[in-house]
Amino acid sequence: MEHYDDLETRVPEARKAQLMAALPAQIAHAKARSPGYAQILAGFDPAAVADRAALAQLPVTRKSDLLERQSPAAPFGGLAAVAVGEAAHLFASPGPIFEFETARRGFWRLERALFAAGFRAGDVVHNCFAYHLTPGGWMLDGAARGLGCAVIPGGIGNSEQQVQAIAHFRPVGYTGTPDFLKVLLDKGVELGADCSSITRALVSGGALFPALRQAYAERGVAVLQCYATADLGLIAYESEAREGLILDEEIIVEILRPGTGDPLPEGEVGEVVVTTLNPDYPLIRFATGDLSAVLPGTSPCGRTAPRIKGWMGRADQATKVKGMFVQPAQVAAVLKRHGEIARARLVVTRHGDSDAMTLRCEVAAGKAAGLEAAIAESLQAACGLKGAVELVDPGSLPNDGKVIDDQRRYD
């Protein structure tokens, strides 16, 4: 099996040592060059942040906070380490959230994902991520050209014209959302245009369902996926082994319990939080709002970086109960008061015409007398609402990252 570089196959201890050695310098750089991080990380000594335990003590910066941060501190909320005029491209994604890229080679680091999906120098790639104001098109365009590929900047829409370009240029690869490739292939059949040159694809920005992947395989297209964001670039990518998504070599990923900054062990579902080594946009403990979990072991493809399961939903589970918002952080506050609780899940239902909530708590055998009443009191104090408490056996709650489970139906 081919690999993009030797970093992918190094022993895990060497990877860990390199990332931890780079971490203090990146934090010092962020504090020195980014006004936002100078404020966020005030009081923290960069030299002391040389392992994951120390990193876990730093504040989390949330993607959901960017809109609020960027309004008074335009254009990037004070988090960029370069002036706006030093950027190569400036973007306005829906929200609006404003992003940028510089001319730094491999700014988004997506070359690695393309290589794993079978793209090579000299290939022609049809890129169907959007180019207009949003970074998706430019992210894959730059990565493909970085690999030495020629790029057809298809963007989105205009399927008839895109099919004409495919039939003419004969690209071997497609990059875009999972569904749009089917639109193009079907349009090719409708128009009698030959799109059979496309034999591989790297998709993102939507769910790649097994049935859709199989349908593409039956049409001669091998489709792999990657996980990337407009802020962080590549987070993880799929290889030909198709067993989870392999973490990029130049980021540090934590899986945190939703509503807290507490790291979770391998296998537990939680929020994906990323620290990058990008000197131009040094995001430190940047919470994506996405849920995933770390898989045990390494990929059969020979790449030794940790793997995650892939996208498993959203961590933001704020729910309105009786007209008041209940947040995962409030549930986490109850857990902190009661060390007997291993895991908890707040279930919201309707009883007649009223909302009701029940906090289900995993508690080991030998439950102390009065524990349910004590937890119920803490729940009311944290949320400002009364709720029932149900003690359940360890391991009985689903391991899906949900802290609040809204089971109400409005249909």
Image (cartoon, rainbow, N blue to C red):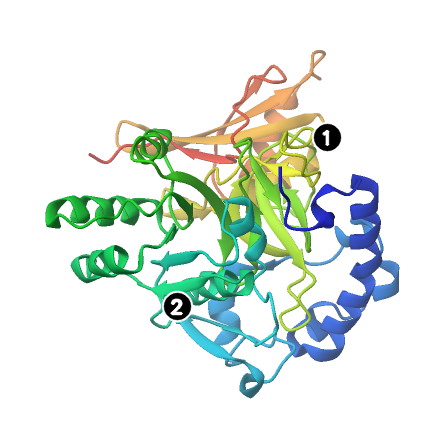
Rendering coords of residue 137 (x, y %): 40, 64
Viewer-side residue, 382 vs 400: 400
Most extreme residue toward the top, as rendered? 365
Residue type at tag 2: Thr
What secondary structure is marked by label 2?
Answer: loop
- Tell me which corner region of the image, top left, top right, bottom left or bottom right, holds residue 286: bottom right
Q: Is residue 149 left or right of residue 126?
A: right
Q: Which mark is in front, 1 or 2?
A: 2
Viewer-side residue, 238 vs 149: 149
**Labels in figure, total:** 2
Q: Which mark is residue 70?
A: none
Task: Tell me if residue 382 can be seen.
Answer: no
Q: Which residue is mark 2?
A: 134
Question: Relative to residue 269, is residue 19 depicted above or below?
Answer: below
Q: Quadrant of the N terminus?
A: top right
Rendering coords of residue 184 (x, y %): 23, 50
- Tell me which corner region of the image, top left, top right, bottom left or bottom right, holds residue 233: bottom right
Rendering coords of residue 119 (x, y %): 49, 50
Q: Is residue 58 left or right of residue 319?
A: right
Question: Relative to residue 321, is residue 125 depicted above or below?
Answer: below
Q: Quadrant of the C terminus?
A: top left
Task: Tell me if residue 360 can be seen.
Answer: yes
Residue drawn at x 49%, y 47% is 226
Q: Which residue is mark 1?
A: 339
Viewer-side residue, 233 vs 347: 233
Residue contact at pointers 1 and 2, CB within 8 angstroms: no
Residue drawn at x 23%, y 36% is 410
Q: CA distance from mark 1 to mark 2?
A: 45 Å
Q: Badge 2: few (under 14), some or many (20 or more) residues near its Cα, within 10 Å?
A: many
Residue type at tag 1: Gly
Q: Badge 1: few (under 14), some or many (20 or more) residues near its Cα, within 10 Å?
A: few
Counting residues from the start of the chain, the first of labels 1 and 2 encountered is 2
